Image (cartoon, rainbow, N blue to C red):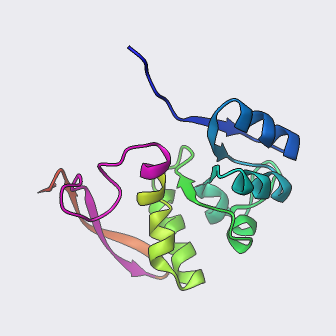
Amino acid sequence: MRFQCVLASHDDTTIEDVLSSKNLGVSIAEFPTTIEAAKESQKEDMKIIMGSPNLMRGGSHSGNISAQELIDENCLDIFSSDYIPSSLLSSAVKWGLESGNMPKAIASISRNPAIATQLLDRGSIQCGMKADLVSFSIYNNLPIVKKVWVSGQAI
């Protein structure tokens, strides 16, 4: 039996780091540390993921490039919760409100990660897809979860 797995790099800094990762079969650039690495990752068709706390905090806790800088350069595809699950929806809403493009921002926590990880039965609202949904409103620029459905059932 042969397994397929999706590989992600971590903290690529230089073009050489990115090319090395790509040569190893990496398709996701997790937390590039510089704009140089992010742009090279994008050029190599690697999806770029950043931690949502980075955006909510206003920058990297370790001094690396911020998620906002990557958004500004159109170099961010996916947010991860990065150990703070509640930050995931908040970061997408923040991005959506500030950019005026809520669908693109919400895709960073739904469709984009599903595609990048080859989980093609989820991530968008379509017939035949897994029916996990979150209904929310926005108050003071933050999401307030109203209702959640898992596998089509309200919980």
In-front residue for pair 58/33: 33
Would you identify the image quadrant in which residue 110 lies? bottom left
25 magenta-colored: no
Percent across and percent down for residue 69 are 75, 68
Describe residue 88's horizontal placement relative to residue 58 as left or right. left
Magenta span of residues = 114-139
Q: Is residue 19 left or right of residue 85?
A: right
Reply above or below: 24 against 116: above
At 75% from the left edge and 49% from the top edge, which residue is drawn?
A: 32
Above or below for 18 versus 24: below
Magenta: main secondary structure equals loop
**Which residue is at 72% across, 74% downward?**
72
In the displayed structure image, the side of residue 47 where residue 67 appears, left or right? right
* Viewport quadrant of the C terminus: bottom left
132 inside magenta stretch: yes
Residue 121, given in percent of the width and then of the height, sits at 29, 49
Q: How many marks?
A: 0
In the drawing, does residue 27 fall left or right of residue 88?
right
Res. 14 visible in picture: no
Location of the N terminus by quadrant is top left
